[in-house]
Image: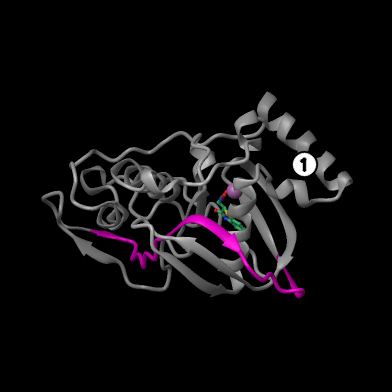
Amino acid sequence: MTAAALPAAGRANAGCADHADRSIALARKARGPYLARIMAIREILEVPDPRLKIVSTPVEPHEFGPELNQLVEDMFETMYDAPGIGLAAIQVGVPKRVLVIDLQPDDPDAPPVECSLDGHKHTHPATKKEPRVFINPVILDPAKELSTYQEGCLSVPEIYADVDRPATCTVRYQDLEGNTHEEALDGLLATCLQHEMDHLEGILFIDHLSRLKRAMVLKKLDKIRRA
Ligand code: GNR
Ligand code: NI
């Protein structure tokens, strides 16, 4: 079907260090008004890092709180910086069942936003952020109908390939306060959530390819690594 933006149009407001991203405010809102902490873009693990094969463990009731909120904030910053539309905690080395997704880090059709947070007037590409957090997600009813997207992965740089997945599904998940929700998903959100859920099982999108295609991808990755 459609190709999804992985390396999209670049950072929403690259080069504006003083207020690097409105996403910080959004993620901080989710974190709550605890300690002010400087943003932390964490390192994204890449193949063949063996940690990407770990099966992540559930977030236990006593683990909800400031440390989890901080992890989620850092994951948003890391994802927006990359840029990507989703990130699983294991991609920053934390083997917990935590996902963040934002399908629209920037909105190419909107007029630029004027800004003077750093003391002088300048503009940013307009963003229409829709940050979503999924803790302990479970897929309830994957559709038999499949849809195909060209996928990429921040942990598998420079590789893009079509993957078939159930076109729709319902996800049950907890929010940062530990409350449980259920939501029906379709389109890119359904695909992205399933891609992220795979990370929680130690599975990468290239594991869904045919042996021949995967062999080609692994060869290309090896070439990239040796370059
Ligand atoms: O940024 C990403 N784009 C993407 C495109 C199609 C299907 C899935 C994704 S997720 C990916 C970011 C990532 O690696 N998440 O784990
Ligand atoms: Ni990925």
Percent across and percent down for residue 157 are 62, 41
Q: Residue furthest right?
A: 212
Is residue 93 shown to the viewer in this render?
A: yes
Where the C terminus falls, by quadrant? top right
- The image quarter in which residue 121 lies: bottom left
Residue identified by numbered label 1: 217
Quarter of the image containing the N terminus?
A: bottom right
- Image x and y of residue 151, in percent: 66, 56
Within 10 Å of disc 1 (Cα), the crowding (few <14, some 14-19, many 20+) is some
Residue 203 colored magenta? no
Q: At 63% across and 55% down in the image, what residue appears?
A: 195
Ligand 1 falls in which quarter? bottom right
Q: Looking at the picture, does residue 129 appear above or below residue 20?
A: below
Q: Position of residue 192 (x, y in %)?
A: 58, 60
| Colour setup of the view | one colour
Q: In this rendering, does residue 49 appear at all?
A: no
Q: Look at the picture and state if 53 lies above or below 80.
A: above
In depth, the one of 212 and 91 nearer the eye is: 91
Q: Amino acid at mark 1?
A: Val
Looking at the image, which is closer to me, 150 or 91? 91
Picture quadrant where residue 162 is located: bottom right
**Residue 128 magenta-highlighted:** yes
Where residue 217 appears, x then y in whole percent?
A: 77, 41
Q: Is residue 23 left or right of residue 168?
A: left
Residue range of the region highlighted in magenta in the rendering? 123-148
Q: What residue do we see at 46% from left, 33% from top?
A: 43
Where 149 sits versus 79, above or below? below
